[in-house]
Amino acid sequence: MSLLERIKKNIFYKFFTNIFVMILIPFIIWMIFFDENSFLIHKRFDKEIEELENSVNFYKDKIEEDKNTIKKLQDSLELERFAREQYLMKKENEEIYLIEFDTIPKK
């Protein structure tokens, strides 16, 4: 039995020379890597969708925080406190001293 005959009787040779397999393998490779709707592009889009959903949730939380802040600022005492803390506003005849703490550890 020659080498060529042994190769033709091999199960892998029979499998890969099947016409359906010969068509299916390039099709799968094309769909995974080269098509405009490829698997890799879908993975990238899924990641982008997840990032956008996270940003939507972040902004929804920020909106809730701002609504609560606005609700608190309806009170004149809270409004005064907010102006003093955030914008360093002061009353007449009043001095403001800013105290900054060094947060960098010394070596």
Image: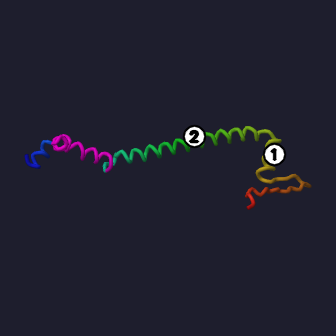
Query: Farthest residue toward the front?
Result: 1
Q: Residue at x 12, y 44 (%)?
A: 8
The image shows residue 13 at horizontal and vertical percentages of 17, 44
Query: Farthest residue toward the right?
Result: 93
Which range is magenta?
10-33
How packed mark 1 is, by other alpha carbons closer than 10 Å (few <14, some 14-19, many 20 or more), is some
**Amino acid bearing label 2:** Asn
> Residue 18: in sight, yes or no?
no
Name the residue carrying label 2: 57
Calculate the distance from the C-alpha at mark 1 to the C-alpha at mark 2. 29 Å
Please tell me whether mark 1 or mark 2 is closer to you in this view. Answer: 2
Question: What secondary structure is the stretch in magenta mostly built from?
Answer: helix
Report the number of discs: 2
Q: Which mark is residue 69?
A: none
Residue 8 colored magenta? Answer: no
Residue 28 colored magenta? Answer: yes
| Mark 1: secondary structure | helix
Q: Residue at x 81, y 50 (%)?
A: 84
Q: Residue at x 47, y 46 (%)?
A: 48
| Mark 2: secondary structure | helix
> Residue 25: in sight, yes or no?
yes
**Residue 25 drawn above or below residue 98:** above
Name the residue carrying label 1: 81
**Amino acid bearing label 1:** Arg
Q: Quadrant of residue 56?
A: top right
* Mark 1 / mark 2, whichever is N-terminal: 2
